[in-house]
Image: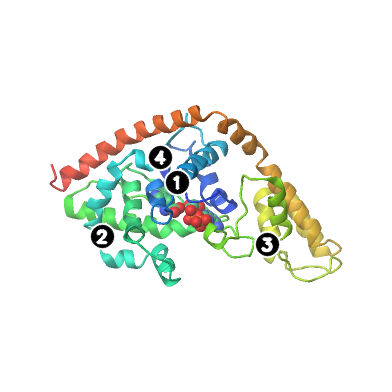
Amino acid sequence: MRILSGIQPSGTLHLGNYFGMMQPAIALQDKGEAFYFIADYHSMTSLFDAEQRRKNSLDVALDFLACGLDPQKSVFFRQSDVPEVTELAWILSTLTPMSLLEKCHSFKDKSAKGLPVNHGLFAYPVLMAADILIYDSNIVPVGQDQKQHVEVTRDIAIKFNEQYGETFVIPEPQIRGETAKVPGLDGEKMSKSYGNTLEIFGEEKPLRKKVMGIKMDSRTPEEPKPDVDQNLAIQLLKLVAPTETAREFENRLRAGGFGYGDLKKGLFEHYWNFFADARAKRAELAANLDYVNRVLADGASKARTLAQTVLKRARLASGLE
Ligand code: ADP
Ligand code: TRP
């Protein structure tokens, strides 16, 4: 079984990225042959600073390795080190109905907000389809918001297979139920575009301030709070604290006599400890960039070999060769 996923180097890693995509991806590396990449071509649709892209790409590499991606188990690479994927994207685009792309939220949301949209953003699901199909991927672990793109990929692959004969493996999205949508500090979906993120790596003081700044209702500490399920700090705590501990916090809130200040303090401590090992590992990796670059070069070479084989299959099927 081949597992594939990618993450854009477009900002700082946050809890949503970690629980929605990175942690499930890392867990899956023991279940099959995993391919994970830094989607730098994708980042070009919305990030226009070259130096920033270089920095972000390296940051994602450090983040992923620090969080447990094991290069002995997974093939880890930069998307643009396999330029074959852009040729496949072109081939696939010729079988992609405009109406399929017009339905995609990624494009619709941005254009509805009046943000400038470019052709790359519109065509982005086709590049994502190429990313997935060029490695004969079976399983694609992603957050809920990417499910539609994997469905588009399936549609395109089925169409190609019908038109030119069996060529591509049809992939399945894999979405983790309980962490499909991690809430942000304002209760909306956590996303760097909403400025409501809690970062995984960063300075302790500003991060503590962010957690302590989470808005709660105006009930006094003494009041019992039966609606713990709605509480944002509890929802986040459940991600980073042992089940027993989270339950204890819930019980204390329900009973009354437990204030939001103490709840947020508890949340911060558990969140900070949850990533303590990863933080130490990341510092080690940052001091050893030669190693990180070697991992990426090695991953690129393995990924490229496979991509060339699958691209050749598509070229033959479609009469380019
Ligand atoms: P952002 O929304 O911050 O721009 P991306 O779109 O770059 O994040 O998402 C990278 C990965 O993280 C994707 O697989 C996405 O599904 C996942 N992800 C992002 N935000 C969340 C969230 N709040 N909950 C669950 N998964 C998320
Ligand atoms: N579009 C994904 C995101 O924004 C990143 C991505 C690009 C991806 N290509 C992919 C994810 C292929 C899974 C498979 O998060």
What residue is shown at x 47% (from left), y 59% (from top)? Answer: 145
Q: Is residue 224 above or below residue 303?
A: below
Image quadrant holding the C terminus, namely top left
Numbered circles on residues, count:
4
Spatial separation of the CA atoms under disc 1 and disc 3 = 32 Å
**Rendered position, 71 above or below 50:** above
Marks 2/1: CA–CA distance? 29 Å
Q: In the rendering, which numbered label is found on residue 182? A: none
Q: Position of residue 60 (x, y in %)?
A: 50, 42
* Residue named by callout 4: 78
In the picture of the structure, the residue carrying the numbered disc 1 is 53
- The residue labelled by disc 3 is 232
Using the numbered discs, state the Cα–Cα distance from disc 2 to disc 4 in whole angstroms.
25 Å
Under circle 4, the secondary element is strand
| Residues marked 3 and 2 touching at CB (< 8 Å) | no
Instruction: Indicate which disc, 1 or 4, sits on the residue closer to the N terminus.
Output: 1
Query: Residue 96's mark?
Result: 2
Residue depth check, mark 2 versus mark 4: number of the one nearer the observer: 4
Q: Earlier in the sequence, mark 2 or mark 4?
A: 4
Query: Secondary structure beneath disc 3?
Result: helix
Q: CA distance from mark 4 to mark 3?
A: 35 Å
Asked whether disc 2 touches disc 1, contact meaning CB atoms under 8 Å apart, the reply is no
Q: Residue 260: x and y, percent?
A: 78, 62
- Name which of mark 1 and mark 3 comes first in the sequence: 1
Report, in whole angstroms, how far the alpha carbon at label 1 lies from the one at label 4.
Answer: 12 Å
Kind of residue indicated by mark 2: Thr
